[in-house]
Image (spheres, rainbow, N blue to C red):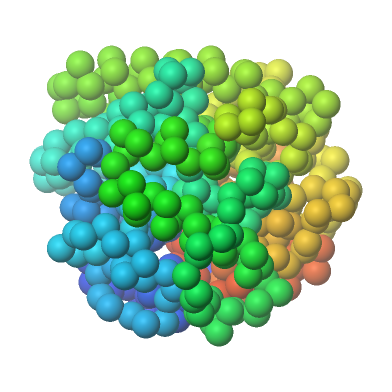
Amino acid sequence: MSQALIDQARKVMDGNDRGSYTVPTHGLYPFQWNWDSALSALGFSHYDIDRAWVEIETLMAHQWADGMVPHIIFHEPDDGYFPGPDVWGTNRVVPTTGITQPAVAGFALRKIFDRSEDKVLARRRLANLLPKIHAWHKWFYKHRDPEASGLVAIIHPWESGRDNSVDWDEALEGVPMEGVASFTRRDTTHANPDHRPTDEQYRRYIWLVQTFRRLGWDNAKLHDASPFRLVDPGFNAILIRSCDDVAELAELIGDPDMALEARAMAAKGRAAMESLWNPKLGQYTCYNRAAGILQDTPTVGGILAAFAQVPTARAEALVARINLLSQRCVYLVPSHDPADSSFDSRRYWRGPSWLIVNYMIADGLILAGQEAMAQRLLADSMRLIEKSGFAEYYDPISGEPCGGGDFTWTAAMVIEILKVQKVPA
Ligand code: DGY
């Protein structure tokens, strides 16, 4: 059974492989996405280690001079996606967007290095990639944490990867819609509009893009100029975890200065995460930096914080929180609490369960000694695959597939889970 699923997952990945990068899925997302690529490389690492390295190498080849790694690289023109390069106007030879995404590449790189048999070659490739990833992490703390709090802010919902989460609702209301040029969405021609963000959200997303473009994509200006500045626990946890991994890898390639810097960033970030603990909910929650408010939005962003290997008491509380959610849905972990009035079981990040999120939460829980809950999340992930195939995300109550189909990172997670976690399928 496991091998049959792995074969199917490989077929999905191969169908989305464009040689030196993967697209998340044909049609809906026809380019290279930053965190999709990094997590998809984990799938490759089990059957084609060279291809896993290439995925990250292609991503990092498009890093900006200031250290930022863009959220989309528009390798080939494709009219089937909006907003394309003409909207972003970043003036690069190979066009990219001007914002970033969760920094999971450092975490993926460590796994790829560990799984490489030819360590001489792997060290050579690592020596090329590691300084780039470290520079990206430093970019985050310089440009997205100008007051050196230890926590970085996102300045656009798309940076979080959790585009239409309830976490952003209040802050997005403060983002104007006036002056946004008229546009035609393409996503709703590829996926059910009921599974996607609303038109109003899209207008506000585009207002932010137009505003940043007017500022010349100058990262020295964007953070303070953005009315949308949110500190997301999940996003910070991913960055902290990647800093840990960069530190370990830097030791391996004999760069103690890099290791020291990476450890210092991770330690400061971890200490600061405590300020996002929300005792009312028993989980971490988002901090609206522009408004100075710790929110009460019960989303999976605050549970994904487990990925940063949180203190034992926090991990225990997160397990209790997931247990509570399990009484409100059938397939863990819903991206929004089903008991909350904003829950929408099929609409992207306002309810559905995602395999990549389950995988990262489980990974963090294992580090914190919470093996039983970790196994439960992985088992639920496999139940979703068996019921509904390799979808983008799933209704956490019915288990129905939502969003795009034949999804690369979902397939990659299946390979990763079956090969590494040995969940019975
Ligand atoms: C989209 O187009 O829906 C993407 O999530 C933006 O990154």
Describe residue 120's horizontal placement relative to residue 311 as left or right: left
Q: Quadrant of the C terminus?
A: bottom right
Q: How many labels does the image show?
A: 0
In the rendered image, residue 369, in percent from the top left (x then y), is placed at 63, 27
**Residue at position x 37%, y 82% from top?**
79
**Residue at position x 27%, y 32% from top?**
134
In the rendered image, residue 367, in percent from the top left (x then y), is placed at 55, 29
Q: Residue 260 versus residue 384: which sits nearer the camera?
A: 260
159 is higher (above) or lower (below) than 132 = below
**Residue at position x 53%, y 15% from top?**
271
Q: Residue 123 versus residue 17: which sits nearer the camera?
A: 17
235 is higher (above) or lower (below) than 396 = above
Q: Quadrant of the N terminus?
A: bottom right
417 is higher (above) or lower (below) than 146 = below
Q: Residue 71 versus residue 240: which sits nearer the camera?
A: 71
In the rendered image, residue 113, in percent from the top left (x then y), is placed at 27, 42
Q: Work out whether residue 112 can be spotted.
A: no
Q: Residue 213 versus residue 393: which sits nearer the camera?
A: 213
Would you identify the image quadrant in which residue 281 lies? top right
Would you identify the image quadrant in which residue 26 lies? bottom left
